[in-house]
Amino acid sequence: MKPIYLLFVGFFVYNPALAFQSEIIDNKPGDPFNFERVEQVSDSLAHLLIKDNLITGMSIAIAEAGKVVLSKGYGLANVEHKVQATPETVYRVASITKQFTAAVILKLIEEGKMEISDTLGKYFPEYPAHGAGITIQQLLNQTSGIGSKKYNTEVEKIAAGRKAFYELSEEEIIEMFANAPLDFEPGEQFAYRNQNYILLGMIIEKVSGLPYGQYLEEKFLKPLGLEQTGYCDESRIIGSRAQGYISAKGEIFNAPYINMKNPGGAGGLCSTVLDLVRWNHLLYSGQVVSRESLDQMTASGILEDGRPTEYGFGLKLGKLGDHRKIYHGGSIQGFNSNLEFYPEEDLSIAVMTNTGSGQDEKISEALARAAFGLEIKNSELSAAERQKYEGSYMVKIPEKTIEIRFFSKDDQLQVDLAGQGISPLLFQGNSRFVAELDKNLVFTFLEEDQGFPELTVEMQGKTFSGTRKDLTSIEDN
């Protein structure tokens, strides 16, 4: 249950030995951002996640109007050699690669070297007829319909065998999915597929005449001054490169090997958090592609029936409260990443970890909430009112039943979630409570004549039910 570890930000003592190379600039008069609070949240999160072996190392960077206002590293970039993580640590960015691929495609279109209406058949004459008419635009906005079942099966086979060490040819990769039926007619639905961007990376090679990684580095990244961003080829010597790990059953293990040439345009890049926030500034200030291309890149795709997809070109579109955000995350063997941009506030947040535990998007959201001062309302309860909710509940979640304990402390109802940490709760009325630091975790008590015998827990978009274990008040020890 990974999400529960992020509920308790700020409620554990921070260990300063975990943080390195900190840089924070005080808020300017009238500055709406609370960067001091952001640092506190970041410190607490890092301490908690590292202590519980959910991550080994983490780097963050936050920039306002292109200026870095906070950058930090926590934990270890390499456990065996005890190398500390810093803002300059190089991580695999995984699917954040997609926005770089999309920008290169748009740049090539601006240069007149290709058209957004070009089809797969133009670049891959042998591509099966049922998919040959898929357009560049449909690849970019993930509406191609390219099937996933056969491809995912083949990827699993490769990961489990010796082929994981080999660079696959273009033909071998395309063979993994091209002959499978489409999941839907192109343009009719949205379906996130790595295959779309792997194909776009191959098309960049055909149009430019250079290998994908070489073209990006020489013709695109270095001219932009992104010196620490590049193709993550395992055979190269890359300074400050982090080792990848996985977290399982409270322990850290080395991540399985993957030949980083194979993810290509879908996930083959490495970078630092400092380079990523710089990339955000360059991209959204119009220094990478034209304003017209940027508008295309950041606009939601529209399906044939008029429904929006909330996905642009290699970018997700969403909101945090009233704050519009453009973002994307990534996950690949041993690494997770998340990069966010809030256009109205010109605020960028980059988070990368070298442990495949899927925490980065939640970390980014916690930092953004701290920056914006987003608060969830809290209605006060008397001691007698709180006492009615105190007790333990047995809640069924996938594969097991956990005990959730509610008790009063500091004049506030609090929750101990399966012994993994304690969080204050915010009362919303009607026997409904929200965890103070994760609005996505909601507890609702179901009242009957004898009190509250049942409970529902909303978490990660799912609802779980629980039954009260006893009716006696539990004092906090």
Image (cartoon, helix red, strand yellow):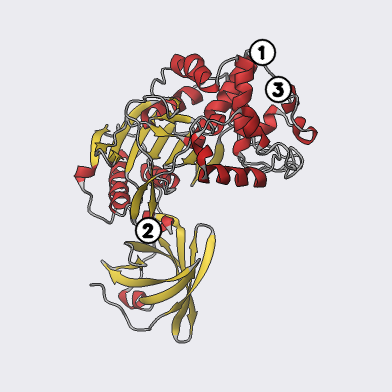
Q: What is the x, y in percent for residue 176?
A: 65, 38
Three-letter residue code for mark 3: Tyr
For marks 3 and 1, give the one nearer the viewer: 3
Contact between labelled residues 3 and 2, with CB atoms less than 8 Å apart? no
Q: What is the x, y in percent for residue 361?
A: 45, 45
Does 375 appear above or below 140? Answer: below
Could you tell me if residue 299 is visible in this image? no
Helix, strand or loop at label 3? It is: helix
Tell me, for residue 74, which label it has, or none.
none
Q: Residue sitting at 35 percent across and 31 percent down?
A: 241
Q: What is the x, y in percent for residue 443?
A: 45, 67
Helix, strand or loop at label 2? It is: loop
Three-letter residue code for mark 1: Gly
Binning the other alpha carbons within 10 Å of mark 3 as few (below 14), some (14 to 19) or many (20 upward) gives: some
| Mark before the other along the chain sequence, 3 or 1 | 1
Q: CA distance from mark 2 to mark 3?
A: 46 Å
Tell me, for residue 249, which label it has, or none.
2
Helix, strand or loop at label 1? It is: loop
Tell me, for residue 123, which label it has, or none.
3
Does 129 appear above or below 248? Answer: above
Q: Residue sitting at 49 percent across and 40 percent down?
A: 329
| Mark before the other along the chain sequence, 2 or 3 | 3
Q: CA distance from mark 1 to mark 2?
A: 53 Å
Binning the other alpha carbons within 10 Å of mark 1 as few (below 14), some (14 to 19) or many (20 upward) gives: few
The quadrant in which residue 106 appears is top right
For marks 1 and 2, give the one nearer the viewer: 2
| Quadrant placement of the C terminus | bottom left
Tell me, for residue 112, which label it has, or none.
1
**In screen coordinates, is 68 left or right of 141?**
left
Q: Residue sitting at 42 percent across and 25 percent down?
A: 229
**In screen coordinates, is 188 left or right of 72?**
right
Three-letter residue code for mark 2: Lys
